[in-house]
Each structure stands twice: as structure tokens, then as C-alpha cells.
Amino acid sequence: YEVFIPLFPRDPWIRSKTLTNGKKTAATLQFHSAVDDDNIAARRAAQEACEIGRATLVVLDAQGEQLERTEEMAESASFAVKKSNRILRGMGSWGGWVANLATPNVTRITATKEYKKCGEGAPRTEAAPMMEGGVDEEHRSHLLGGRTTRTGGPTKPGSLDSIYERQENHLDAMSAAAAELSGIGMAMSSALSEQVEAIARIESNTETLNDDIRTVSRRAGRIAQSKWSKREKAAFKMYVNIRQIETQLLLGSMNDVVVLSASSPLALANIWGLWERQGNAIGLRNELTGRWIGQGFLGDIRCTAMEFGKWEEWEMNEKCMSSTRLICCSANWNSGGYIHADQDTLTVKGINPDSKKGAAFWSFTESEGYEQRKMAKTNKK
């Protein structure tokens, strides 16, 4: 509303009309001043959100750098262990030496870092700068004072053009802040996705590294026993039933053939003597046949050995005997291999992560009362 300038100030009606318009103008200016305060507060909040977003991107980038360094360290350790494993394989036997000739040498994997970019070539730790305009008193005075419109014409304080201009400036500033926040959000999403993938790779590399370390430990133990010291005698641990978790079938032996059956756990064919030797190697002796389960000459699993030799060495997770995979230590040139169960047939696979995923899980439980029954039978004799 424009202030009404009376042509005849002495006229009472015109005088009252002038006062009324003056009150409306004051109320309008007060209203738009409150709107300006709200706009300034909104721009302040937007700027703070952008600053927090930039700081978060910096933290995410540092975290990504740390994950990359961890991945590089894991790959370096994996290379050293694989190299040691190859050397020990060649030292262990002529077959291992021939296997080294037939397989390519271990090569180091060099990780290359790719910086993700957000927007038009900006690094992910940066976003589009907020457009000029602010929340301090200087910008407030500019907003409330006279300035030039988009068309270049002067404006008056309190006029509709001035109000429109302030609103347009506010919308421009908020639009720029929204664009920056959108860019920050996209950069954060990209960084988090990369870190999730990096964590998955580190987890996979750690599992592979753990398997490789166990393989090196087995090879080193075998070389130590065969070349520099006498073979350590196996120590008896307990009598166990071995149940495949997926099918709930018991591992047993019938006529020197390894089978999975649903017969009673008390049957001698399903009871195994668990023996342990240096290097975390275990042996399984069937109580019905008195023979040891191991890998045959053709790679199949049999229960025909009269002694606990190298071909009868197995490995499991002793810390979790209720759910563990079984590794045949002599498989794959003494590198080991996971046991897979297809219905009632057991096969030896590789030692790689794919073979590990498909390996069968086994539950080792102590055979209740068998040792007491055996001792009572021996004493009776």
C-alpha cells in the first residue's frame, strides 16, 4: 500500500482516510519485516546444513582412505603368505615341485584408487559453493534497503517491487543451497557405497588369508616332522558322533565305505575316535572297523587305512565343533580341500572361497556313555 497524500488536508474525511492508510502501510512493513527475519533464519539453517554436509564428506573421505590402506595391507599380507605357501609346497615333495612348475607364479595385486566425482568434475569432498547472500546484518540491511531490480530500475523500500526482489533473492539463495545439499547427498551415497564394497572385499580377503595361513602352517608342520624331527604321536581326545547339519545324517563306515545314514548314534559304525596331532591335524578312527578315514589314491574318501598317516589328516574349527567345515589336508597337493556332501556321497573340492561357500557343515558331539561301556567291557574281559 502506498501512503495516501491528501490534496485537501483540512477536509476531515480525507484526513481520516490518510491516517487509516498510514496504519495499513505500517502493518504491511511490519509483516514483511517478519517475513525477512524468517527468510534469514531459513538461509542460516541452510548454510549450516551445507557446512555439516561438507564436514561429513571430509570424514567419509578420510574413512575411505583408511579402508583402502587396510585393503592394501591385507593384499600385501596375502601375497607374502601365498609366496611362502608356494615355496613350502616345492620343499615338501617332488609332487609339489612339479605342481609349482605347472602353475603360474604368485603375482602381487596393486590396487588403483579411483576418485569418484560429484557434479561437473568436482571432487566428492566438495560441493557447489553457496550463492552469495547471507544471514548477517549487512545482508539484512541490503535486503531491507533499496537496491536495483533485475531490469535495472530503482526500487523504494516497502514497495511491491522491493518485496518481490527480496523474495526472489531469497528463493535464489535457497535454490543454491538445495542444489548443494543434493550434491552432498549424492557424494555421501557414492562414498558409502564404495566403503561397503571395500568392507566386503576386505572380509573376503581376510577369510582367504586365514585359509592360506592355515595351509602354510600345515605344510610347515609336515616338513618339520618329516625332515628335522620324529613324527609326534597322536593323542586321543574323545569318542564322537559326526552329524551333517544340512541333512541331519550321521557319518559312518560300512565295509570300509564312508556313508551318511539315519541309523542310531549308538551304533559302532557311527562312532569315531577323535585323535589330535601337532599342527592342528586330527584323525578319525571308526570304532566298528578300527580303520582311519582319509583320502584314497584316486582322490575319493575312504575308511581303509590301518594307521594315522598324512593321507588321514583332517582339520576343523575346534572352537566351534557344533558347526564346522571339514578340510582334507592331503588334497590338492597338500594345500587342503573342503568336503562337500551330495546326498550320501562325499567329495573333496578346492581350498578357494567358492569351495568354502559350498562346503558341508558338520556337528561333532561326544558319544554319550560309549567310553564307559567300552571300559566296562574291557574290565569284564
Image: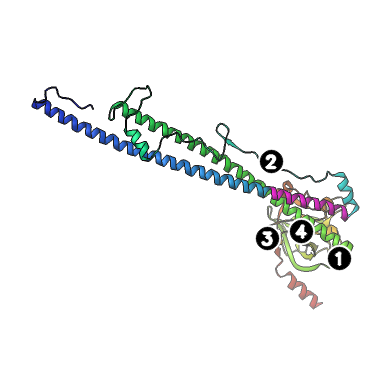
Left or right: 110 with respect to 96? left
Marks 4 and 1, the one that precedes in the sequence: 1
Across and down, in percent, residue 352 comes to 75, 48
- Label whose residue precedes the other's in the sequence (2 or 1): 2
Label 3 or label 1, whichever lies nearer to me, is 1
Mark 3 crowd level (few <14, some 14–19, many ≥20, 10 Å Cα): few
In the picture of the structure, the residue carrying the numbered disc 3 is 320
**Of marks 3 and 2, the one in the foreground:** 2
Q: Indicate which disc, 2 or 4, sits on the residue closer to the N terminus.
A: 2
Q: What's the amino acid at mark 1? A: Arg
Amino acid carrying label 4: it is Glu
Picture quarter containing residue 24?
top left
Q: Residues within 10 Å of mark 2 (few under 14, many from 20)?
A: few
Q: Is residue 207 visible?
A: yes
Q: Nearer the viewer, residue 255 or 280?
A: 280
Mark 1 lies on residue: 231
Label 2 sits on residue: 112
Q: Element at badge 2?
A: loop
Residue neighbourhood size for the residue with mark 1, other residues' Cα within 10 Å, grouped as few (<14), some (14–19), many (≥20): some
Query: The C terminus lies in which quarter of the figure?
Result: bottom right
Hey, what amino acid is under mark 2?
Answer: Thr
Q: Residues within 10 Å of mark 4 (few under 14, many from 20)?
A: many
Mark 4 or 1: the one toward you: 1
Q: Is residue 99 above or below residue 283?
A: above
Q: Looking at the picture, which amino acid does disc 3 mark?
A: Cys
